[in-house]
Image: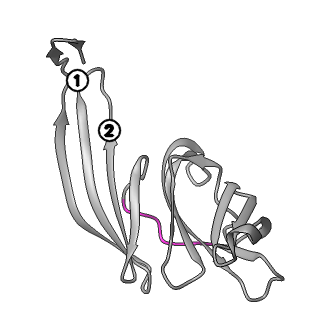
Amino acid sequence: RISVVASLSDLWELDLTAEPHAQQWQQATAFPDDMDGTPSMRYNHSMTSVADSSRIIMLGGVGWDSVTSTFGRLSDAWELARTPLATSGGYRWRRLANCPVTLGQHGATEHESSLYVHTLNYIRDQEIGPANGVLLAFDLRTERWNVLVSVATPVSTPQLWSSQDGVY
């Protein structure tokens, strides 16, 4: 089953186990977390399914931070899971522990009960600024973050490369 979130209040799913001619998108319901509601609108976030479960983990992105009342890179983490209490197509948002760094543009994948996240956040200061590369692991059983690798490298102005056909 594949689930797609068009907006954070608009959830659609496609049952990939059905025969291709019988596959149809169906709208599902996403209930808010009892304490934290639903995630804010965002872009550049990741959504990763957890193997052998009906859980999807959404991380970071760029959007409105309701805690700091600012717009920028987010560090929040959310779980969207099928809930047995709801009628067919019911899911519930649940807030997870915040990531130790903001996650603007990043990649995430699940492997053996951990979610591995790599981020390379550029902070521009005119033409030159630092890039912070971080590799993180989120243990899906204990819901704790671990920083595996953290690297700060300088970023210089992009170089133009010449060729016989022109400049790249």
Asked if 157 appears above or below 139 in the picture, the reply is: above
Asked if 18 appears above or below 14 in the picture, the reply is: below
Mark 2, residues whose alpha carbon is within 10 Å: few (<14), some, or many (≥20)? some
Mark 1, residues whose alpha carbon is within 10 Å: few (<14), some, or many (≥20)? few
Front position among marks 2 and 1: 1
Image quarter of residue 85: bottom right
List x then y, in percent, for residue 150.
21, 57
Q: Nearer the viewer, residue 77 or 8?
A: 8
Asked if residue 34 shows in the view, the reply is no
Taking the spot 39% from the left edge, 52% from the top edge, the residue there is 106
User: In this image, 151 relative to 36: left or right?
Assistant: left
Secondary structure mostly seen in the magenta stretch: loop
Q: Which residues are magenta?
A: 94-100
Residue for badge 2: 122
List x then y, in percent, for residue 26.
79, 66
Task: Work out which quarter of the rendered image holds the N terminus and state it.
Answer: bottom right
Taking the spot 68% from the left edge, 80% from the top edge, the residue there is 82
User: In this image, 152 relative to 23: left or right?
Assistant: left
Secondary element under disc 1, as helix, strand or loop, is loop
List x then y, in percent, for residue 130.
23, 37
Distance (Cα) linking label 2 and label 1? 13 Å
User: In this image, 53 relative to 1: left or right?
Assistant: left
Residue for badge 1: 158
Secondary element under disc 2, as helix, strand or loop, is strand
Q: Amino acid at mark 2?
A: Tyr
Q: Is residue 114 magenta?
A: no
Image quarter of residue 89: bottom right
Residue furthest out toward the right: 87
